[in-house]
Amino acid sequence: MRTPPPPNPLTTVSVWIAAIFIALREGAAMTPSLAGLAAAMGGAWSYLPLAVLILAAVVYLMRTVFDPNARTLPPPVFAARPAPEAEKPPEPPPPEAGKPPEPPAPRIFLSPHNDVAQLLGVGQGQTHYQAERAFEPFVGKWMHVQGQFGDLLQLGLPTEPQYVVHLDSNDRASRPPLSLTFDPDWLDRLTILQRGQNIRVAGRVSSRSFGVLNLNHCELERPE
């Protein structure tokens, strides 16, 4: 594409001559004292502005077409639209996915002399901090307890319930200070137990609070 050259002096002068002639003619026609001048500018002279404008247009077009110095604009460059990204294939599963699950850690049971009373008495007479540090070696270990089935409670959220069993005793003062938490899988077996029924439970030591030993992940071993 060629850029048009700027107007040359001849084109500019021609346009001005045509404009001045038309202005004089129109002004003379509107002034009675210049009626003779208006008549003189009529007739064939009235075509002078048109001829001058045509000459200016012809000169301008000839310069536009035949001027060797006219610049040629480069063709327009259109930005290429980026190609859409190809969908990534699904990532392969990690190598560990095909391995069988690791077996659960072996259960370590406390010795029989580590009963409920002994665990609750660990750190007695020490500061709370010292007593908790002394109790830490027992956390995560398993132990056996037994007694009479007393009550069943549901705790936790409805979507993640936990079931807590309290043991009972004929003598309320000798009631075992235990809180036995069972997972939901044990609910069917827990609901058929009767108050006063002797049960044996295996549970993992979790914590102790307010003089109560808490065991979780409990399992019934031998309902009697």
Image (spheres, helix red, strand yellow):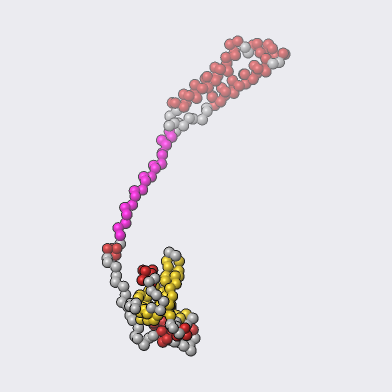
The quadrant of the picture occupied by the C terminus is bottom left
Q: Nearer the viewer, residue 183 or 88?
A: 183
Left or right? Give the position of 224 relative to 46: left
Q: x, y percentage for residue 135? A: 42, 83
Residue extending furthest toward the left:
99
Quadrant of residue 132 in the image? Answer: bottom left
Q: Nearer the viewer, residue 204 or 181?
A: 181
Q: Which residues are magenta?
A: 72-93
| Residue that appears at 63% across and 13% down | 41
Q: Nearer the viewer, residue 218 or 131?
A: 218
The quadrant of the picture occupied by the N terminus is top left
Residue 100 appears in the rendering: yes
Residue 134 appears in the rendering: no
| Residue that appears at 42% across and 71% down | 163
Verify whether residue 78 appears in magenta: yes
Q: x, y percentage for residue 25? A: 64, 16
Verify whether residue 38 appears in magenta: no
| Residue that appears at 29% across and 70% down | 102
Q: Main secondary structure of the magenta part?
A: loop
Residue extending furthest toward the bottom:
125
| Residue that appears at 42% across and 86% down | 117
Q: How many marks?
A: 0
Q: Nearer the viewer, residue 197 or 29?
A: 197
Q: x, y percentage for residue 22? A: 62, 18
Q: x, y percentage for residue 159? A: 43, 64
